[in-house]
Image: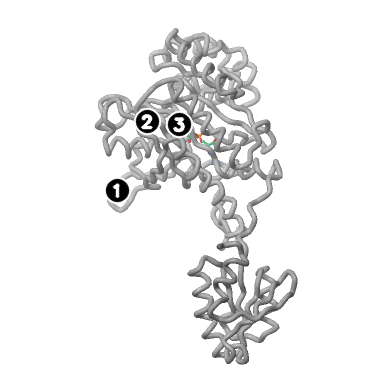
């Protein structure tokens, strides 16, 4: 039986040592995306359920089986966000996107899906995502894809270890003729396919292409290529996306079976897969979309992606990327006697104000146990203050690597340590 202190299955506690690498992933987003003109948007973690129903699509796995939906005390149906795009679109529409204008935003934070937990599949997971909303042009998609790859390589995923899969879902007008052609093909085989595929034949035949059940694979393999069934406009759009990626020297594989699990996509869809992290090998996915929002007459269009931070971390581990170095403890203050302890309280304060990391024993323990602590936290310098030093208005400064000890006037020690630690 699970211990009562364990987090719920599919969720994790992240301790300070682990958070260092999480902060690296977050800091990279804050540093990189603004270089492409994107600003951060923070939306609520829960929304009215219909925000997700309308945009993600009734027939998707997310809506059918994975949403954390509950009624609040006012009997309103609310849902923990399973992804970021729907909430971002709601927020932008609420603010009002002037016709012909473009908004570029990025977001990061937890998302919630009631999936069966597995390696790389959590119930509370974290995404960094971006959305470029309001305009449609193939090169906007190209730039967005390039930004995703730029992000992934900056956080340590070697470009040669990942593959960019690309496809087109065409315009909304393409959906019906392609669906008809797919249905004509799958109708002949559906009795030999899984239950989900049997249901999808009538509800959303495109999604059959996404089925991962092994026994369905040969029928999916034999299906007509959706890209060949698209109208000329859609094929031209896709060609330009491919051309833009070629221009930038981005490697990609056209995968006519890539449909993605959300219904809002039109034209470009893409996924980045990383071999070697198990079945959940998609580290990021995205595409161009059109979303109908309540109170907005025209569908709102945009392009974006989301990358899963847990999966990026698995990929980093697989590639043995060195974790970020722990922040150094610059100084540990050792106090001998009550007066020294009080003086050190002030000194530690001044050191921290000056930008140094300063730790100290606050319980008035013996010298040996304080020195043991200084070693344990791997302090670069230890300052030792006793009655004698107080009388002389100095403090003993021990370099913990060389064991060299020097007396410094108390009035000068902050400046000295700042320079010794490379801060000035
Ligand atoms: P998605 O493909 O559903 O797309 O999710 C994007 C990424 O989130 C996945 O590639 C994966 O890395 C991560 N992810 C999804 N589910 C889980 C899970 N249960 N556990 C761990 N990681 C997970 C979207 O969410 C779209 N909103 C992307 C987008 C933005 N499209 C346009 N704009």
Mark 3: give few (<14), some (14-19) or many (20+) Cα within 10 Å.
many
Between marks 2 and 3, how big is the CA–CA gap? Answer: 8 Å
Q: Residue furthest top?
A: 232
Q: In the rendered structure, are the residues bearing label 1 and label 3 in contact, judged by CB atoms less than 8 Å apart?
A: no
Residue 286 versus residue 394: which sits nearer the camera? 394
Q: Is residue 54 above or below residue 138?
A: below
Inspect this view and state whether residue 354 appears. yes
Dot 1 and dot 2 residues touching (CB under 8 Å): no
**Dot 2 corresponds to which residue?**
133
- Mark 1: is the Cβ under 8 angstroms from ligand 1? no
Callout 2: helix, strand or loop?
strand
Horizontally, residue 188 falls left or right of residue 171, namely right
Query: Does the Cβ of the disc 3 residue fall within 8 Å of ligand 1?
Result: yes
Is residue 226 placed above or below 197 in the rendered structure? above
Q: Which mark is residue 144?
A: none
Quickly name the residue at label 1. 75
State if disc 3 and disc 2 touch (CB < 8 Å). yes
Q: CA distance from mark 1 to mark 2?
A: 33 Å
Q: Quadrant of residue 82?
A: top left
Question: Does 293 sit left or right of 402 as displayed?
Answer: left
Residue 64, horizontal then vertical, whole percent: 45, 34
Q: Quadrant of residue 214?
A: top right
Residue placed most toward the observer, 366 or 44 = 366
Between discs 1 and 3, the one toward the N terminus: 1
Give the label, 1 or 2, closer to the camera: 2
């Amino acid at each position: 039986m699970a211990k009562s202190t364990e987090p719920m299955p599919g969720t994790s506690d992240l301790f300070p040592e682990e958070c260092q690498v999480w902060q690296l992933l977050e800091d990279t987003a804050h540093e990189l995306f603004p270089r492409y003109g994107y600003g951060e948007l923070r939306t609520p973690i829960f929304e009215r359920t219909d925000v997700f129903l309308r945009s993600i699509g009734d027939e998707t796995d997310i809506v059918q089986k994975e949403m954390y939906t509950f009624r609040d005390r006012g009997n309103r149906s609310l849902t923990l966000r399973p992804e970021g795009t729907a909430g971002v679109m709601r927020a932008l529409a609420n603010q009002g996107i002037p016709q012909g204008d473009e908004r570029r935003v990025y977001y990061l934070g937890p998302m919630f899906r009631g999936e069966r937990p597995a390696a790389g599949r959590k119930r509370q997971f974290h995404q960094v995502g971006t959305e470029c909303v309001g305009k449609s042009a193939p090169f906007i998609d190209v730039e967005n894809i390039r930004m995703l790859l730029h992000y992934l390589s900056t956080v340590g995923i070697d470009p040669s270890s990942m593959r960019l899969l690309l496809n087109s879902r065409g315009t909304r007008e393409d959906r019906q003729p392609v669906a008809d052609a797919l249905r004509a093909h799958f109708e002949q085989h559906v009795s030999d396919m899984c239950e989900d595929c049997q249901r999808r034949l009538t509800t959303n035949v495109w999604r059959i292409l996404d089925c991962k059940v092994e026994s369905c694979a040969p029928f999916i393999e034999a299906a007509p290529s959706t890209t060949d069934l698209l109208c000329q406009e859609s094929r031209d759009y896709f060609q330009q996306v491919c051309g833009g990626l070629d221009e930038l020297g981005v490697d990609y594989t056209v995968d006519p079976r890539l449909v993605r699990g959300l219904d809002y996509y039109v034209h470009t869809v893409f996924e980045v897969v990383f071999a070697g992290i198990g079945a959940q090998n998609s580290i990021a996915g995205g595409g161009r979309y059109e979303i109908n929002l309540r109170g907005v007459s025209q569908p709102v269009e945009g392009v974006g992606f989301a990358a899963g931070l847990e999966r990026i971390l698995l990929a980093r581990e697989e590639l043995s990327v060195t974790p970020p170095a722990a922040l150094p403890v610059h100084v540990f203050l050792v106090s001998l006697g009550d007066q020294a302890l009080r003086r050190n309280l002030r000194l530690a304060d001044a050191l921290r104000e000056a930008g140094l990391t300063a730790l100290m024993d606050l319980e008035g323990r013996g010298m040996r146990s304080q020195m043991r602590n200084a070693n344990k936290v791997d302090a670069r310098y230890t300052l030792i203050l006793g009655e004698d030093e107080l009388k002389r208005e100095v403090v003993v400064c021990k370099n913990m690597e060389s064991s060299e000890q020097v007396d410094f006037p108390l009035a000068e020690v902050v400046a000295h340590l700042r320079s010794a630690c490379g801060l000035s």
